Amino acid sequence: MSPIDRRDFLVHGASAAAAFALTSELVAAASLPQTKVPIDVALIGCGRQGRAILGELAKIEGVKVVAVVDVLDSRLKSGQRRVQGAEGYATTAEMLDKAKSVAAVFVATPSHTHKDVALECLAAGKHVYVESPLATTIDDAKALVQAARKSGKVCVTGMYGRSNPIYGLARSFFRSGALRDTVTMRAQYHKKNTWRTPGANAEEEAALNWPLDPKVSLGLVGEYGTQQFDVFHWFLGAYPTAVRGFGSIQLHKDGRTVHDTVLCELQFPGERRLIYDASLANSFDSQHELICGTMGSIKLAWTAGWMFKEADSPTQGWEVYANRQQFHDEQGITLIADATKLAAQGKLKEGVGLPNPPLYYPLADFLKSVTENTPVACSVDEGLRAAAVAILANQAITTGQTVAIDEALLKSE
């Protein structure tokens, strides 16, 4: 979304009171209840994320999952149980050879295998959705971007923020200048979790626990930070120039070497900084992003969002209809679409939040791009940039050194 004129935005905002916390009707209109053209698809990778993808695809009429792929038999069977009639395959090559009707694939394999799987599918003429991070090395990410460009197929990175209706509306406020000058930025991912998965034998356990293998894992900044870094890239239209970080094992002292708690500082142009922390040792305040400006702040939490206005911020007109939520000593404004009508009906507080998990929206956007030729929500070029920032952040965390982010590393050429 390009920056919009502040005056036009406020005129429209006063009449429609565009929202962070959306009415269910508005979100439904922004989503994709069905594909215009029926399409056969395949899922590659039937782990937790893959099974979540299957659950969301089941909501979209016209999409038929005809094949699932996983190298582990237990997970393959688990995937098949979730999709009636889907054929199961142990390898991507076997699926591509036998499931000829497949037009698009969803890649949810371990992060370090994304590149090889996606290249194989692009070479076979399939449209490809790749879970984040796009790859775990910058060379792999660049190779994938170049292959996608040459293929002529739709190839996207699954970045949830860019497809999230709440985040899109929040970004329109931010880009209109509602916060004025950006002062500070913060984000976190907190979820108390061992990050371990038991296996039937040592080989299977090693395969399942690849996130704890420092030879292939980008740790918390790769698996979760990538998504959140991209939110700031998208809002600011800018990328960090340097990163420093720290990591430690605070809870899970079970022999692992991949940190369970990390913190990093990303430097952006204009002396702006993003402080990011993630932990598997604590769940307080979950996952969110916060942008503070001289006239207000925006807090985003994936299924909801709020604006906090400074006392000297000018009144814009729609505030009289705004739903408010108390946060300690602060009052957050939950902006609701068609607020005048809802207030008259006594329904101002209804419909706050997303009716579907954040994962649903990038899947729906990808399918819309494939079947209707609409612009992609997140290109693999942006996926490369987010992955590169996470790769360098992980390098800073593991080495304890400040790492410069050369602009050339963010380009595929």
Image: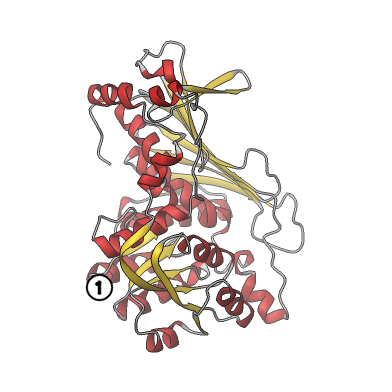
Tell me: 347 left or right of 249.
left
Tell me: 267 left or right of 190.
left
Q: Residue at x 46, y 24 (%)?
A: 345
Q: Nearer the viewer, residue 145 or 375?
A: 375
Q: Residue at x 61, y 76 (%)?
A: 75
Q: Position of residue 22 (x, y in %)?
A: 44, 36
Q: Quadrant of the N terminus?
A: top left
Q: Is residue 332 visible?
A: yes
Q: Nearer the viewer, residue 86 or 285?
A: 86
Q: Relative to 176, is 316 above or below?
A: above
Is the residue marked by circle 1 packed among few (<14), some (14-19), or many (20+) residues within 10 Å? some
Q: Relative to 105, is 263 above or below?
A: above
Please state which amino acid type lies under the numbered disc 1. Ser
Q: Position of residue 205 (x, y in %)?
A: 69, 75
Q: Quadrant of the C terminus?
A: bottom left
Label 1, on which residue? 151
Q: Residue at x 64, y 69 (%)?
A: 209
Quadrant hosting residue 122:
bottom left
Q: Is residue 384 visible?
A: no
How many numbered circles are shown?
A: 1
Q: Position of residue 35 (x, y in %)?
A: 33, 62
Quadrant hosting residue 335:
top left
Tell which residue pokes out farthest to the top in this image: 312
Q: Relative to 194, is 22 above or below?
A: above
Q: Relative to 388, is 67 above or below?
A: below
Tell me: 398 left or right of 295.
right
Quadrant hosting residue 126:
bottom left
